[in-house]
Amino acid sequence: MQIKRVRYTYNREGYFYFSRRVPDDLVQHYDCRRIVQSLRTKQPSEARSRAALLASKLDAYWAQMRLMNADMPGKHRLRQAVVGSGPMSRVGPPVAHSVSLNEALDIYLKQKGAGKGKTFRMAAERACGYLIDAAGLKHLHEYTRADGLAFRDFLVKRGLVGSSVSRVFNSISAVFNFASSELGLDLRNPFQGIYHDRTAGVSKRLPVPVDVIRKIQRECVNIDDDCRWLVALVSDTGLRLSEAAGLRLSDINLDAPVPHVVVEGNQYRGLKTRGSERKVPLVGASLWAAQQILAYSDEQSSEAAAFPRYTRGGFAQANSASAALNKWLRPYVPKGCTMHSFRHAMRDRLRAVDCPSEMIDQIGGWAHVSVGQGYGSGYLLENLQRYLDAIVLR
Protein backbone atom coordinates (compact mmCIF):
# COMPACT_ATOMS: atom_id res chain seq x y z
CA MET A 1 0.00 0.00 0.00
CA GLN A 2 1.31 3.41 -0.99
CA ILE A 3 1.56 5.84 1.93
CA LYS A 4 0.68 9.45 1.21
CA ARG A 5 3.62 11.84 1.41
CA VAL A 6 3.51 14.32 4.35
CA ARG A 7 5.94 17.25 4.56
CA TYR A 8 8.71 17.03 7.22
CA THR A 9 7.98 13.36 7.86
CA TYR A 10 9.02 9.89 6.91
CA ASN A 11 7.30 6.59 7.55
CA ARG A 12 8.64 3.59 9.39
CA GLU A 13 6.56 0.43 9.81
CA GLY A 14 3.39 2.44 9.20
CA TYR A 15 4.11 5.18 11.79
CA PHE A 16 4.97 8.76 10.85
CA TYR A 17 8.12 10.45 12.21
CA PHE A 18 8.84 14.17 12.19
CA SER A 19 12.24 15.02 10.66
CA ARG A 20 13.77 18.46 10.27
CA ARG A 21 17.34 19.43 9.37
CA VAL A 22 19.06 21.90 11.71
CA PRO A 23 19.99 25.12 9.82
CA ASP A 24 23.71 25.57 9.17
CA ASP A 25 23.89 28.83 11.16
CA LEU A 26 22.47 27.15 14.29
CA VAL A 27 24.11 23.75 14.13
CA GLN A 28 26.74 24.75 16.74
CA HIS A 29 23.95 24.76 19.36
CA TYR A 30 23.04 21.10 18.73
CA ASP A 31 24.79 17.77 19.13
CA CYS A 32 23.21 16.43 15.92
CA ARG A 33 22.35 17.69 12.43
CA ARG A 34 18.74 16.53 12.31
CA ILE A 35 15.80 16.57 14.75
CA VAL A 36 13.69 13.41 14.69
CA GLN A 37 10.59 12.71 16.77
CA SER A 38 7.81 10.15 16.56
CA LEU A 39 4.36 11.59 15.78
CA ARG A 40 2.70 8.46 17.18
CA THR A 41 0.15 8.09 14.42
CA LYS A 42 -0.44 6.11 11.25
CA GLN A 43 -2.98 8.57 9.84
CA PRO A 44 -1.61 10.99 7.20
CA SER A 45 -4.09 13.73 8.17
CA GLU A 46 -3.03 13.64 11.84
CA ALA A 47 0.63 13.41 10.88
CA ARG A 48 0.27 16.48 8.63
CA SER A 49 -1.21 18.66 11.38
CA ARG A 50 1.23 17.50 14.07
CA ALA A 51 4.24 17.94 11.78
CA ALA A 52 3.07 21.42 10.79
CA LEU A 53 2.73 22.39 14.47
CA LEU A 54 6.21 21.12 15.33
CA ALA A 55 7.69 22.85 12.29
CA SER A 56 6.13 26.18 13.24
CA LYS A 57 7.40 25.87 16.82
CA LEU A 58 10.89 25.13 15.55
CA ASP A 59 10.80 28.08 13.15
CA ALA A 60 9.79 30.42 16.00
CA TYR A 61 12.44 28.96 18.29
CA TRP A 62 15.19 29.29 15.67
CA ALA A 63 14.12 32.85 14.97
CA GLN A 64 14.62 33.64 18.67
CA MET A 65 18.06 32.06 18.64
CA ARG A 66 19.07 34.10 15.59
CA LEU A 67 17.77 37.24 17.27
CA MET A 68 19.78 36.56 20.44
CA ASN A 69 22.91 35.99 18.37
CA ALA A 70 22.36 39.09 16.25
CA ASP A 71 24.74 42.03 16.64
CA MET A 72 22.12 44.44 17.96
CA PRO A 73 22.95 48.01 19.09
CA GLY A 74 23.44 48.22 22.86
CA LYS A 75 23.56 44.44 23.31
CA HIS A 76 26.81 44.74 25.27
CA ARG A 77 25.07 47.02 27.78
CA LEU A 78 22.46 44.41 28.82
CA ARG A 79 22.66 43.31 32.44
CA GLN A 80 21.44 39.84 31.44
CA ALA A 81 19.92 38.13 28.44
CA VAL A 82 16.15 38.57 28.05
CA VAL A 83 14.50 35.79 26.12
CA GLY A 84 11.02 35.79 24.64
CA SER A 85 8.38 33.08 24.58
CA GLY A 86 8.96 29.45 23.84
CA PRO A 87 11.53 27.05 25.25
CA MET A 88 13.77 29.95 26.34
CA SER A 89 10.97 32.09 27.84
CA ARG A 90 12.70 33.34 30.95
CA VAL A 91 15.17 35.95 32.12
CA GLY A 92 18.64 34.45 32.17
CA PRO A 93 21.39 33.21 29.87
CA PRO A 94 20.26 31.82 26.50
CA VAL A 95 20.63 28.15 25.67
CA ALA A 96 23.52 29.02 23.37
CA HIS A 97 25.56 30.05 26.42
CA SER A 98 24.46 27.25 28.73
CA VAL A 99 25.26 23.55 28.88
CA SER A 100 23.30 20.45 29.75
CA LEU A 101 23.73 18.70 33.09
CA ASN A 102 25.71 15.91 31.43
CA GLU A 103 28.05 18.43 29.81
CA ALA A 104 28.47 20.19 33.17
CA LEU A 105 29.31 16.83 34.75
CA ASP A 106 31.98 16.18 32.09
CA ILE A 107 33.54 19.58 32.75
CA TYR A 108 33.53 18.94 36.50
CA LEU A 109 35.08 15.47 36.26
CA LYS A 110 37.77 16.51 33.77
CA GLN A 111 38.92 19.45 35.88
CA LYS A 112 38.15 18.51 39.48
CA GLY A 113 38.30 14.75 39.11
CA ALA A 114 41.83 14.58 37.71
CA GLY A 115 43.92 12.32 39.93
CA LYS A 116 41.03 11.48 42.25
CA GLY A 117 39.72 8.01 42.88
CA LYS A 118 36.79 6.08 41.50
CA THR A 119 34.62 7.05 44.47
CA PHE A 120 34.77 10.74 43.55
CA ARG A 121 33.57 10.07 40.01
CA MET A 122 30.88 7.63 41.10
CA ALA A 123 29.45 10.06 43.67
CA ALA A 124 29.12 12.85 41.10
CA GLU A 125 27.67 10.55 38.43
CA ARG A 126 25.22 8.98 40.90
CA ALA A 127 23.98 12.40 42.08
CA CYS A 128 23.45 13.64 38.51
CA GLY A 129 21.68 10.39 37.65
CA TYR A 130 19.28 10.93 40.54
CA LEU A 131 18.57 14.48 39.34
CA ILE A 132 17.85 13.31 35.80
CA ASP A 133 15.45 10.69 37.17
CA ALA A 134 13.71 13.28 39.33
CA ALA A 135 13.58 16.35 37.07
CA GLY A 136 14.82 15.28 33.64
CA LEU A 137 17.94 16.13 31.66
CA LYS A 138 18.01 19.90 31.12
CA HIS A 139 20.38 22.78 30.52
CA LEU A 140 21.62 24.32 33.75
CA HIS A 141 19.59 27.52 33.32
CA GLU A 142 16.39 25.48 32.91
CA TYR A 143 16.49 23.96 36.41
CA THR A 144 14.22 25.79 38.86
CA ARG A 145 13.54 25.91 42.57
CA ALA A 146 10.60 23.59 41.97
CA ASP A 147 13.07 21.07 40.50
CA GLY A 148 15.18 21.38 43.65
CA LEU A 149 12.20 20.65 45.88
CA ALA A 150 11.08 17.77 43.67
CA PHE A 151 14.64 16.41 43.80
CA ARG A 152 14.62 16.46 47.60
CA ASP A 153 11.28 14.62 47.73
CA PHE A 154 12.58 12.09 45.19
CA LEU A 155 15.63 11.29 47.34
CA VAL A 156 13.56 10.97 50.51
CA LYS A 157 11.10 8.67 48.73
CA ARG A 158 14.01 6.47 47.64
CA GLY A 159 14.77 5.93 51.32
CA LEU A 160 18.04 7.87 51.56
CA VAL A 161 18.88 8.95 55.10
CA GLY A 162 19.43 12.63 55.91
CA SER A 163 23.22 12.50 55.68
CA SER A 164 23.05 10.80 52.26
CA VAL A 165 20.60 13.40 50.97
CA SER A 166 23.06 16.09 52.10
CA ARG A 167 25.93 14.42 50.22
CA VAL A 168 23.88 14.13 47.02
CA PHE A 169 22.87 17.80 47.18
CA ASN A 170 26.50 18.78 47.84
CA SER A 171 27.61 16.85 44.75
CA ILE A 172 24.94 18.45 42.54
CA SER A 173 25.77 21.94 43.83
CA ALA A 174 29.48 21.32 43.22
CA VAL A 175 28.85 20.29 39.59
CA PHE A 176 26.44 23.19 39.02
CA ASN A 177 28.65 25.86 40.60
CA PHE A 178 31.90 24.66 39.03
CA ALA A 179 30.48 24.51 35.50
CA SER A 180 28.85 27.92 35.93
CA SER A 181 32.13 29.40 37.12
CA GLU A 182 34.21 27.79 34.37
CA LEU A 183 31.85 28.98 31.62
CA GLY A 184 31.14 32.39 33.15
CA LEU A 185 27.41 31.73 33.50
CA ASP A 186 25.47 34.11 35.71
CA LEU A 187 23.19 31.49 37.26
CA ARG A 188 21.55 31.10 40.62
CA ASN A 189 21.94 27.57 41.94
CA PRO A 190 18.40 26.25 42.62
CA PHE A 191 19.77 23.34 44.68
CA GLN A 192 21.35 25.42 47.41
CA GLY A 193 19.47 26.14 50.61
CA ILE A 194 16.93 23.34 50.09
CA TYR A 195 15.73 22.28 53.53
CA HIS A 196 15.70 18.63 54.55
CA ASP A 197 15.98 16.79 57.85
CA ARG A 198 19.66 15.90 58.09
CA THR A 199 19.07 13.57 61.02
CA ALA A 200 16.30 11.52 59.40
CA GLY A 201 17.15 7.82 59.56
CA VAL A 202 20.71 8.49 60.73
CA SER A 203 21.91 6.11 63.45
CA LYS A 204 24.58 7.26 65.86
CA ARG A 205 27.99 5.67 65.39
CA LEU A 206 29.06 3.86 68.58
CA PRO A 207 32.67 3.57 69.77
CA VAL A 208 34.15 0.11 70.17
CA PRO A 209 34.39 -0.68 73.92
CA VAL A 210 37.94 -0.91 75.29
CA ASP A 211 37.63 -4.57 76.36
CA VAL A 212 36.39 -5.45 72.86
CA ILE A 213 39.32 -3.60 71.26
CA ARG A 214 41.71 -5.64 73.40
CA LYS A 215 40.03 -8.88 72.30
CA ILE A 216 40.09 -7.88 68.61
CA GLN A 217 43.78 -6.95 68.79
CA ARG A 218 44.58 -10.39 70.27
CA GLU A 219 42.67 -12.05 67.41
CA CYS A 220 44.61 -9.95 64.88
CA VAL A 221 47.91 -11.21 66.33
CA ASN A 222 46.68 -14.83 66.33
CA ILE A 223 45.44 -14.79 62.71
CA ASP A 224 48.34 -12.57 61.52
CA ASP A 225 47.37 -11.80 57.90
CA ASP A 226 47.15 -8.59 55.87
CA CYS A 227 43.45 -8.02 56.68
CA ARG A 228 44.12 -8.25 60.41
CA TRP A 229 47.16 -5.95 60.02
CA LEU A 230 44.80 -3.34 58.58
CA VAL A 231 42.39 -3.71 61.51
CA ALA A 232 45.21 -3.48 64.06
CA LEU A 233 46.74 -0.46 62.33
CA VAL A 234 43.44 1.42 62.49
CA SER A 235 42.69 0.37 66.07
CA ASP A 236 45.62 2.23 67.67
CA THR A 237 46.03 5.14 65.24
CA GLY A 238 42.45 6.25 64.62
CA LEU A 239 43.15 6.45 60.87
CA ARG A 240 40.19 6.47 58.50
CA LEU A 241 39.94 3.12 56.76
CA SER A 242 40.55 4.74 53.36
CA GLU A 243 43.67 6.46 54.72
CA ALA A 244 45.09 3.18 56.03
CA ALA A 245 44.13 1.06 52.99
CA GLY A 246 45.82 3.55 50.64
CA LEU A 247 49.17 3.76 52.45
CA ARG A 248 52.45 3.20 50.61
CA LEU A 249 55.37 1.31 52.10
CA SER A 250 57.28 4.59 52.18
CA ASP A 251 54.58 6.07 54.44
CA ILE A 252 55.60 3.68 57.23
CA ASN A 253 58.69 4.97 59.01
CA LEU A 254 60.02 2.59 61.69
CA ASP A 255 63.60 3.91 61.75
CA ALA A 256 62.74 7.38 63.03
CA PRO A 257 63.23 8.25 66.73
CA VAL A 258 59.45 8.09 66.95
CA PRO A 259 58.07 5.31 64.66
CA HIS A 260 55.18 6.82 62.74
CA VAL A 261 52.97 6.65 59.69
CA VAL A 262 52.68 9.52 57.20
CA VAL A 263 49.17 10.33 56.02
CA GLU A 264 49.23 12.31 52.78
CA GLY A 265 47.64 12.22 49.35
CA ASN A 266 49.22 9.75 46.94
CA GLN A 267 48.57 7.85 43.73
CA TYR A 268 46.24 5.42 45.48
CA ARG A 269 43.89 7.86 47.20
CA GLY A 270 43.43 11.49 48.13
CA LEU A 271 42.50 12.82 51.55
CA LYS A 272 39.13 13.91 52.87
CA THR A 273 40.29 17.39 53.89
CA ARG A 274 43.47 19.46 53.84
CA GLY A 275 43.72 19.02 57.61
CA SER A 276 43.85 15.24 57.19
CA GLU A 277 47.51 15.44 56.17
CA ARG A 278 49.51 14.48 59.26
CA LYS A 279 51.98 12.13 60.97
CA VAL A 280 50.72 9.66 63.57
CA PRO A 281 53.01 7.78 65.99
CA LEU A 282 52.85 3.98 65.88
CA VAL A 283 52.24 2.32 69.23
CA GLY A 284 50.79 -0.94 70.51
CA ALA A 285 48.86 -2.94 67.92
CA SER A 286 49.48 -0.36 65.19
CA LEU A 287 53.25 -0.67 65.65
CA TRP A 288 53.00 -4.47 65.47
CA ALA A 289 50.92 -4.22 62.28
CA ALA A 290 53.41 -1.83 60.64
CA GLN A 291 56.29 -4.18 61.46
CA GLN A 292 54.41 -7.12 59.91
CA ILE A 293 53.60 -5.13 56.76
CA LEU A 294 57.25 -4.27 56.11
CA ALA A 295 58.59 -7.67 57.18
CA TYR A 296 56.35 -9.65 54.84
CA SER A 297 56.24 -7.29 51.87
CA ASP A 298 57.96 -8.69 48.78
CA GLU A 299 57.84 -5.33 46.97
CA GLN A 300 61.12 -3.54 46.33
CA SER A 301 59.65 -0.14 45.49
CA SER A 302 58.94 2.21 48.39
CA GLU A 303 56.01 3.55 46.34
CA ALA A 304 54.34 0.15 46.41
CA ALA A 305 51.03 -0.18 48.26
CA ALA A 306 51.12 -1.35 51.86
CA PHE A 307 47.89 -3.30 51.25
CA PRO A 308 47.99 -4.61 47.63
CA ARG A 309 44.76 -6.55 48.24
CA TYR A 310 42.86 -3.26 48.48
CA THR A 311 44.70 -1.18 45.86
CA ARG A 312 44.01 -3.27 42.77
CA GLY A 313 43.43 -1.17 39.69
CA GLY A 314 45.62 1.64 41.02
CA PHE A 315 43.17 3.06 43.55
CA ALA A 316 42.43 2.21 47.18
CA GLN A 317 39.27 0.08 47.38
CA ALA A 318 38.04 1.38 50.75
CA ASN A 319 34.48 0.13 50.18
CA SER A 320 35.69 -3.41 49.53
CA ALA A 321 37.89 -3.27 52.63
CA SER A 322 35.02 -1.94 54.71
CA ALA A 323 32.62 -4.68 53.60
CA ALA A 324 35.10 -7.50 54.25
CA LEU A 325 36.41 -6.23 57.58
CA ASN A 326 32.99 -5.27 58.95
CA LYS A 327 31.81 -8.79 58.18
CA TRP A 328 34.74 -10.23 60.13
CA LEU A 329 34.21 -7.81 63.04
CA ARG A 330 30.48 -8.47 63.42
CA PRO A 331 30.73 -11.41 65.88
CA TYR A 332 33.14 -9.47 68.11
CA VAL A 333 31.59 -5.99 68.37
CA PRO A 334 28.25 -4.68 69.74
CA LYS A 335 25.47 -4.00 67.27
CA GLY A 336 26.02 -0.71 65.48
CA CYS A 337 29.83 -0.83 65.61
CA THR A 338 31.90 -0.88 62.41
CA MET A 339 35.51 -0.24 61.39
CA HIS A 340 34.78 3.48 61.62
CA SER A 341 33.88 2.97 65.29
CA PHE A 342 37.60 2.64 66.08
CA ARG A 343 37.87 6.36 65.26
CA HIS A 344 35.11 7.19 67.71
CA ALA A 345 36.77 4.98 70.32
CA MET A 346 40.14 6.68 69.75
CA ARG A 347 38.68 10.05 70.67
CA ASP A 348 37.18 8.63 73.89
CA ARG A 349 40.40 6.81 74.79
CA LEU A 350 42.44 10.01 74.39
CA ARG A 351 39.92 11.98 76.45
CA ALA A 352 40.31 9.39 79.22
CA VAL A 353 44.03 10.23 79.58
CA ASP A 354 43.36 14.00 79.53
CA CYS A 355 44.83 14.51 76.06
CA PRO A 356 44.30 18.14 74.94
CA SER A 357 41.46 18.53 72.45
CA GLU A 358 43.70 20.26 69.91
CA MET A 359 46.13 17.32 70.06
CA ILE A 360 43.27 14.85 69.59
CA ASP A 361 42.26 16.74 66.43
CA GLN A 362 45.84 16.55 65.14
CA ILE A 363 46.10 12.79 65.77
CA GLY A 364 42.78 12.04 64.08
CA GLY A 365 43.05 14.61 61.29
CA TRP A 366 39.80 16.25 62.37
CA ALA A 367 38.92 19.71 61.07
CA HIS A 368 40.15 22.74 62.99
CA VAL A 369 37.53 24.40 65.15
CA SER A 370 39.27 27.78 65.35
CA VAL A 371 41.55 29.78 63.07
CA GLY A 372 44.30 29.66 65.67
CA GLN A 373 44.54 25.87 65.42
CA GLY A 374 45.81 26.25 61.87
CA TYR A 375 48.77 28.37 62.96
CA GLY A 376 52.21 26.82 63.45
CA SER A 377 53.34 23.25 62.77
CA GLY A 378 51.36 21.53 65.51
CA TYR A 379 52.55 19.20 68.27
CA LEU A 380 55.81 17.28 68.00
CA LEU A 381 55.66 13.54 67.42
CA GLU A 382 57.18 13.00 70.87
CA ASN A 383 54.20 14.75 72.47
CA LEU A 384 51.70 12.73 70.45
CA GLN A 385 53.52 9.50 71.25
CA ARG A 386 53.33 10.13 75.01
CA TYR A 387 49.53 10.27 74.99
CA LEU A 388 49.13 7.39 72.52
CA ASP A 389 51.40 5.24 74.69
CA ALA A 390 49.10 6.00 77.61
CA ILE A 391 46.11 4.41 75.86
CA VAL A 392 47.84 1.24 74.65
CA LEU A 393 46.00 -1.85 75.90
CA ARG A 394 48.85 -3.83 77.44
Image: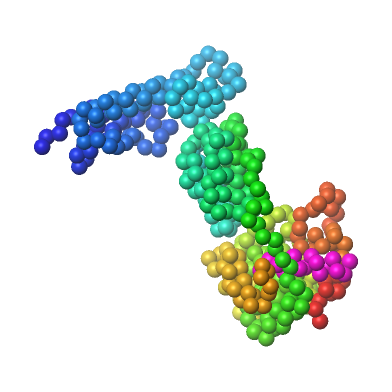
Q: Which residue: 24% across, 29% down?
A: 46
Q: Image height check: is 157 above or below 227?
A: above
Tell whether 142 sits left or right of 221. left
Of 150 and 242, which appears nearest the observer? 150
Q: Residue furthest top?
A: 73
Q: Position of residue 223 (x, y in %)?
A: 64, 84
Q: Position of residue 157 (x, y in %)?
A: 53, 50
Residue 227 in sight here: no
Q: Main secondary structure of the magenta part?
A: helix
Q: Image height check: is 51 above or below 311?
A: above
Residue 386 in sight here: yes
Q: Residue furthest bottom?
A: 222
- Residue 342 within the magenta-colored segment of the rendering: yes
Q: Quadrant of the C terminus?
A: bottom right
Tell whether 174 sits left or right of 217. left
Tell whether 391 sits left or right of 311. right
Q: Which residue: 21% across, 36% down?
A: 42
Q: Which residue: 11% across, 34% down?
A: 2
- Residue 33 within the magenta-colored segment of the rendering: no
Q: Residue furthest left?
A: 1
The quadrant where residue 347 appears = bottom right
Q: Position of residue 121 (x, y in %)?
A: 55, 53
Q: Which range of residues does the magenta coloring cover?
A: 338-354
